Image (spheres, grey):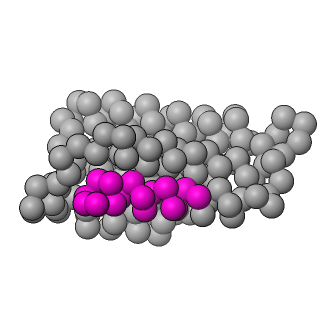
């Protein structure tokens, strides 16, 4: 077993651990989602990606990993995102971090800007209106 299939197994194990860890969480009541919603959705998404990788593993990375500079840069972006979480407004911070990430991975400025603005606005709306989270 090599590359993508090994990654699929890791994702499936991670998904199983997330789903098992949320067994005791309350599901919510009266149409209000509980604390189990986001981890369970994440777990199901990991199961889906893992199954797709098992089914169609693809070629894997070339000997020198694709986007070899984007990987550590993404880790730094996530660290920066966590550090600036309470300092910069959520929508602005999310948009800037997404724009930077998309540019790192080679998306053109126009597409990256449109995607970052739409994702930041959608996430802000989802959290504020759908889940009642105030930033």
In this rendering, the answer to whether 9 lies above or below 55 is below
In depth, the one of 58 and 131 nearer the eye is 58
Query: Dominant secondary structure of the magenta stretch?
Result: helix
Q: Is residue 58 visible?
A: yes
The residue under the point 28% across, 60% down is 1
Q: Is residue 33 left or right of residue 112?
A: right
Q: Where does residue 88 sit, x and y in percent of width and height? A: 49, 57
Q: Nearer the viewer, residue 128 or 92?
A: 128
Does the magenta portion include 2? Answer: yes
Which residue is outermost to the right? 30
- Percent coordinates x, y for residue 10 in the rendering: 43, 62
Q: Is residue 10 left or right of residue 36?
A: left
For the image, the number of numbered tags is: 0
Residue drawn at x 65%, y 56% is 19
Q: Nearer the viewer, residue 130 or 113?
A: 130
* Residue drawn at x 21%, y 38% as measured from the top left: 107
Q: Position of residue 98 (x, y in %)?
A: 36, 47
Quadrant hosting residue 129: top right
Outermost residue on the left side: it is 63
Q: Residue furthest front?
A: 1
Q: Give the image quarter of residue 112.
A: top left
Q: Is residue 89 visible?
A: no
Q: Is residue 82 magenta?
A: no
Stretch of the chain drawn in magenta:
1-16
Q: Residue at x 47, y 69 (%)?
A: 83
């Amino acid at each position: 077993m090599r590359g993508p299939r090994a990654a699929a197994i890791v994702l499936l194990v991670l998904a199983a651990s997330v789903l098992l860890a949320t067994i005791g969480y309350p599901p919510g009541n009266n149409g209000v989602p509980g604390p189990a919603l986001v981890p369970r959705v994440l777990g199901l998404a990991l199961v889906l990606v893992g199954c797709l990788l098992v089914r169609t593993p693809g070629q894997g990375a070339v000997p020198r990993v694709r986007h070899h500079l984007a990987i550590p840069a993404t880790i730094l972006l996530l660290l920066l995102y966590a550090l600036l979480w309470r300092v910069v407004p959520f929508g602005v911070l999310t948009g800037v971090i997404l724009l930077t990430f998309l540019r790192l991975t080679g998306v053109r400025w126009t597409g990256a800007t449109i995607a970052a603005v739409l994702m930041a606005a959608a996430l802000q709306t989802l959290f504020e209106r759908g889940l009642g989270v105030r930033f």
